[in-house]
Amino acid sequence: MEKQRQRRCRLVLVPLPFRGHINPMLQLGSILLSKGFSITVIHTAFNSPDPSNHPEFHFVSIPHNLSDQVISSGNLVLLISVLNVNCQAPFQECLVRVVEQQDEQEEIACIIYDELMYFSEAAAKYVKLPSIIFRTTSASTYISRSGILQLKAEGILSLQGTCSTSQDLVPGLHPLRFRDLPVSKFGIPENFLRLISNMSKTRTSSAVIWNTIDVLEQSSLPKIQKQCQVPIFPIGPLHKVAPASSSSLLKEDTGCITWLDQQIQNSVLYISLGSVASIDKKELVEMAWGLANSKQPFLWVIRPGLVDDLEWNKLLPEGFIETVGENGCIVKWAPQTEVLAHGAVGGFWTHCGWNSTLESISEAVPMICRPCFGDQRVNARFVSHEWRTGLQLENPFERGKIERAIRSLMVEKEGEEMRQRAWNLKEMVELCVREGGSSYVSLNQLVELIISF
Ligand code: UDX
């Protein structure tokens, strides 16, 4: 990519310390580096990224002071809220130092922070630097979060009662049902409401960068732009725009690619529930027998932490490995984008994290959607009812239903139609990132804005 200017300027990026957020932030950094900017990443010592994957970035660590109790609670709402309190002072001190040490030939142009690291903004203001918010979930999720706040204020949503499991459509939020709203399963509702209110505000930021694509969110993005005082730049899917590099925190098992090489075209179901979702042992057992009974080849990621902290060989039911034999491959962590791009992969059983959803769409892989919490529910609904490139596996979660869903996606006409739609969507997404496409144009506008600061 062409360099935009002679004198470089530096950007400070502040990722939320979770894989689903670090990955897109580092991808954004790589893209902006290729546009001629220098990159400093200020990150917490908790879940810190591996600097050796990005030797061209400058990494600076700040203390987080999270107690073991908060970290092991598994309560993401609590953890993120505490991070926002604990990191504010260390971040500001760090930013002051970075500004004092800046090179005259490479002044800092702005701070780009994850929407959930909203403490960053006060520090940016303190050092008199502009800030830009980076949103790593879909625009539809943003709209539905605002919807939650409004429904709660109107007394229509209780967050504790039957509302969140209701099949009724939410007024004004097509195609979402109440049960698809991105409510939290973590802790008390008031904390969650405070968090989504904080992350939804633009405050004094100068712009919003979004890892999404115009063609996927044609109804949501214009609505948001209409309400938002500052420009919005949908420049995704970032993993397709960014020069390839690994930012994985876990070691990828590349042996599964060799196994995929031996499988028939479009025959394999790839299963992964991302980096934070967890399920209980009973669900894992139903999944296992549903898979085995479907007789479809599968590549299954069972990462430590998916079910408690147990390794997969302690979790799977007796007789399962013998039954599936060579038909299954199980790993702790896969090179997911490579897996999805492999010709043998014909379906993706996903929790519908936004990165996984974008990665699947980018490779035209139809999905079985089984969301666990938050934005995953919104994404699953859009995959199954708006883009119609997948089916949603609803409760009761049992092996017979799972087997039928797998066969429907992988070998029946319904799945074939989804695959065809997925190909059409992939082609539209490719156009967006090509020269003149919406993401391409947005990215150049973003660069112009940053240069103008
Ligand atoms: C979290 C939230 O759970 C999700 O709802 C939100 O949209 C983003 O933040 P996570 O659950 O990890 O993310 O899911 P996802 O967004 O799909 O990100 C997972 C990332 O890990 C993807 O980029 C995927 O390629 C990568 N991955 C996953 C691997 O590289 N290997 C694997 O085996 C599994």
Image (cartoon, rainbow, N blue to C red):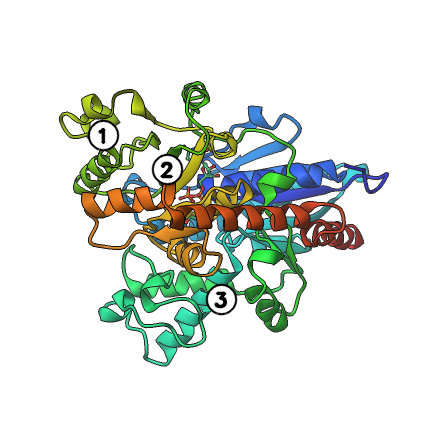
The residue that disc 3 covers is 143
Q: Nearer the viewer, mark 2 or mark 3?
A: 2
Is residue 94 in sight in this rendering? no
The x, y position of residue 372, in whole percent, is 32, 50
Where on the picture, by quarter, is residue 155? bottom left
Secondary structure under tag 1 reads loop
Is residue 10 in sight in this rendering? yes
The residue that disc 1 covers is 310
Mark 2 or 1, nearer chain start: 2
Mark 1 or 3, nearer chain start: 3
Secondary structure under tag 2 reads strand
Tag 3: Cα neighbours inside 10 Å, few (<14), some, or many (≥20)?
A: some
What quarter of the picture does the N terminus occupy? top right
Q: Is residue 175 above or below residue 406?
A: below
- State the residue at coordinates (28%, 72%): 158
Where on the picture, by quarter, is residue 14? top right
Mark 2 or 3, nearer chain start: 3
Q: CA distance from mark 2 to mark 3?
A: 27 Å
Q: Marks 1 and 3: CB-CB under 8 Å?
A: no
The x, y position of residue 62, in whole percent, is 50, 38
Q: Is residue 70 above or below residue 253?
A: below
- Amino acid on which disc 1 is placed: Leu
**In the foreground, 103 or 289:** 289
Tag 1: Cα neighbours inside 10 Å, few (<14), some, or many (≥20)?
A: few
- The reply to whether the residue tagged 2 has its Cβ within 8 angstroms of ligand 1 is yes
- Amino acid on which disc 2 is placed: Ser
The x, y position of residue 383, in whole percent, is 44, 54
Where on the picture, by quarter, is residue 253? top left
The residue that disc 2 covers is 272
Q: Marks 2 and 3: CB-CB under 8 Å?
A: no
Q: CA distance from mark 2 to mark 1?
A: 16 Å
Secondary structure under tag 3 reads helix
